[in-house]
Amino acid sequence: MQTNDLVALKAALPSLASGRRNFAESLLKQAKRKALSPAQSEWVVKLVAEASAPKPEAVAVGDMTGLIALFGKAAAKLKHPKIRLALPGGAPVVLSVAGAASQNPGSINITDGGPYGANVWYGRVDALGC
């Protein structure tokens, strides 16, 4: 682990989402006490890259009331409803509703369906279609 990476992580804290910021702060505290593990060192690099990545701009996608109603109806019978699609090349696209503990509860997340942290996150659609 390079000291420069830790300095970069400290500088990146304001650019991180609150959950990621808390995680980054815990890594920095740990680094003061003792050396970070290889996995923790990888997270330092990942968080710095995440903070410096360009932020996507919001794009209005239109009326999403039908899609939100579909998820609402599915939630009456399913604990975690999802819509799984595939692009023409076969790449998966999964739509799922963000839970109550999410930073954006009720929004529809669009990913490749992989496990959290290892997935490709394409964006989210809120109830207003943004």
Image (spheres, rainbow, N blue to C red):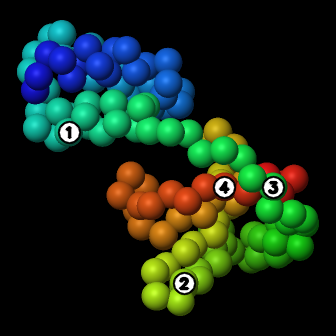
**Which dot, 3 or 4, sits closer to the camera?**
3
Residue at mark 2: 87
Residue 88 image position (x, y, % from top left): 53, 89
16 left or right, relative to 61: left
Task: Name which residue type carries label 2.
Answer: Leu
Q: Report the disc number at residue 98.
A: none
**Which dot, 3 or 1, sits closer to the camera?**
3
Residue at mark 4: 124
Image: 56 above or below 47: below
Quarter of the rendering occupied by the N terminus? top left
Residue 102 image position (x, y, % from top left): 63, 43
Q: Which callout, 3 or 2, points at the residue further toward the start of the chain?
A: 3
**Which dot, 4 or 2, sits closer to the camera?**
2
Q: CA distance from mark 1 to mark 4?
A: 26 Å
Q: Report the disc number at residue 42.
A: 1
- Element under label 3? loop
Q: Which callout, 3 or 1, points at the residue further toward the start of the chain?
A: 1
Residue at mark 3: 60
Q: Could you classify mark 2 by the number of other residues whose Cα lies within 10 Å: few (under 14), some (14-19), or many (20 or more)?
A: few
